[in-house]
Amino acid sequence: MGQIKVTPAPIKGLYIIEPAVHGDARGYFMETYSLRDMTEAGLDMNFVQDNQSMSVKGVLRGLHFQKEYPQGKLVRVIKGRVFDVAVDLRRDSETYGQWYGVELSEENKKQFYISEGFAHGFLVLSETAEFCYKVTDFYHPGDEGGLAWNDPTIGIKWPELVGEYQGDANAAGYTLADGTPLNLSEKDQKWLRLSDTFAF
């Protein structure tokens, strides 16, 4: 029996990955990735790079995607807690424009696999969070696209977030429930809504 449990999410192409954690008084051990277990679950992706970032409470990164060189991502949190989100951008998908989110933390040790064809973002809910992810293609400068994190037509329910949509992706007026200001990069406050980004 494998050491990693793979569960499909409600949107096709998204998966929750749960490792078997072996712990005792000394600490714990777990396999965070197994090619064998992934292959048995029908996932045959090839990862080419590992990335890691640190963010402070209230930071929201996203929603990002690669336009010509889409990446599959296997994401997890090794310190702290985030709410991680994927939005379906596959034009021929029955769930186009829909989102799915999952809390990832150092406590639950869950991972989230996001196939190619999704936008991705996360909100930091702890004082700090260290975020690790494997990707199936290299980063290509100039190929990054994005969506407004608060697009009302997508309707992501970011936990602990307080504020009202003012017609754009600006973070002004938004805070976490404890008063921590929402913190976005300048670039992430300029992305447009889904309908404006992908006009048919």
Image (cartoon, helix red, strand yellow):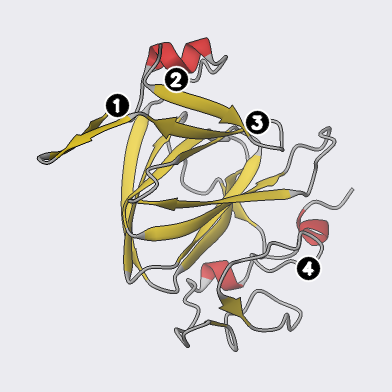
Q: Which label sits on residue 31? A: 1
Residues 129 and 140: in front is: 129
C-alpha separation, residue under disc 4 versus residue under disc 3: 23 Å
Disc 3 marks a residue whose amino acid type is Gly
Task: Name the N-terminal-most of marks 3 and 2.
Answer: 3
Residues 14 and 137: in front is: 14
Residue most extreme to the right: 200
- The residue pinned by badge 3 equals 13
- The residue pinned by badge 2 equals 46
Disc 2 marks a residue whose amino acid type is Asn
Q: Residue at point 36% right, 19% down? A: 34
C-alpha separation, residue under disc 3 versus residue under disc 2: 15 Å
Residue 50: percent from the left, percent from the top?
33, 36
Position of the N terminus, as image quadrant, is: top left
- Whether label 3 touches label 1, CB < 8 Å: no
Q: Secondary structure at mark 1?
A: loop
- The residue pinned by badge 4 equals 152
Residue 95: percent from the left, percent from the top?
80, 40
Examine the rendered structure and indicate whether residue 190 appears above or below residue 50.
Answer: below
Quarter of image, res 14: top right
For mark 3, does the 10 Å Cα neighbourhood hold few (<14), some (14 to 19), or many (20 or more) residues? some
Quarter of image, res 124: bottom left
- Whether label 3 touches label 2, CB < 8 Å: no
Task: Name the N-terminal-most of marks 2 and 1.
Answer: 1
